[in-house]
Image (cartoon, helix red, strand yellow):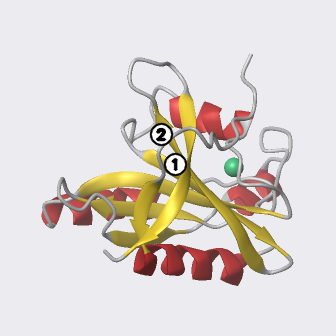
Amino acid sequence: MRRRIEVDPDLDPVVLPTSVLNEIFAHAREVAPEECCGLITGGDDARYQHVVRCRNDMTLWHRRDAETYPRDGTQGFYMNEQDYLRADEEALARGERVTCVYHSHVECGAYFSEMDQDFASQELFPFPDADHLVVAVTAGKVVDQVLFRREPGADRFGGRPVAHGLR
Ligand SMILES: [Zn+2]
C-alpha cells in the first residue's frame, strides 16, 4: 500500500529558476481554492525552462460523474488532455520535452499523496520520466514547495527540497 511521501531533508535540493517558480506560484494563487496544474519543459542543459499552464478539469468531471470522481478541483487535479498534448507537441517543436508536472495543494502540505503517486505511476501516464512539483497554498499564499523525483534504482519517489536559482 502506498503512503504519502514527505520532503526528505537528506536529499540534495533541486534548483529551479526563480522566474519559473514565480510563474507557478502565481498560477497556484490565482486558481485557489482550486488546485492548479501544468507542465515545465526544458532540455538537457536547462531542465526547467518554460511553464505551461493546463486546465484542471477535476470539478468538471466531478459534476458529470461524482461516483467515479468523488473529489472536485479543490482536492485533486485532472489535467485537461488537449492542454497537455499541445504543450508536449510545442515542447518537442522547440527541441525540449516535458521535464516536470506541477500542481498545488490548498490548505494542506506539499506532500506527494497516494492519489498523486497513482496518477504518476499509471501505465498510460504520458510523462513517466518527469519530476513532480507540489506547491502548498495556505490562506492565499504559497508556503512550501517540494519536488518529487523517482530515485535511481528505487520504485518510489523521493521528496527533494527546492532552491531558487537564477536560470
Ligand atoms: Zn496532490
Up the image or down, 26 lies above or below 152; here it is below
124 lies left or right of 48: right
Comparing 55 with 127, the one in front is: 127
- Judged from the image, the secondary structure of the residue bearing numbered disc 1 is strand
Up the image or down, 147 lies above or below 107; here it is above
Can you tell which quarter of the image residue 45 is in?
Answer: bottom left
99 lies left or right of 82: left
- For image coordinates 63% across by 63% down, the residue present is 56
- For image coordinates 44% across by 54% down, the residue present is 14
| Label 2 or label 1, whichever comes before in sequence order | 1
Comparing 65 with 127, the one in front is: 127
The CA distance from mark 2 to mark 1 is: 7 Å
**Residue 34 in sight:** no
Up the image or down, 113 lies above or below 33; here it is above
Local crowd size for mark 2, using a 10 Å CA cut-off: few (<14), some (14–19), many (≥20): some
Q: Quadrant of the N terminus?
A: top right
67 lies left or right of 31: right
- Residue 149, label in figure: 2
80 lies left or right of 19: right
Amino acid type indicated by mark 1: His
Q: Which residue is mark 1?
A: 132
Residue 83 spot, x, y in % from top left: 44, 64
Residue 72 spot, x, y in % from top left: 81, 57
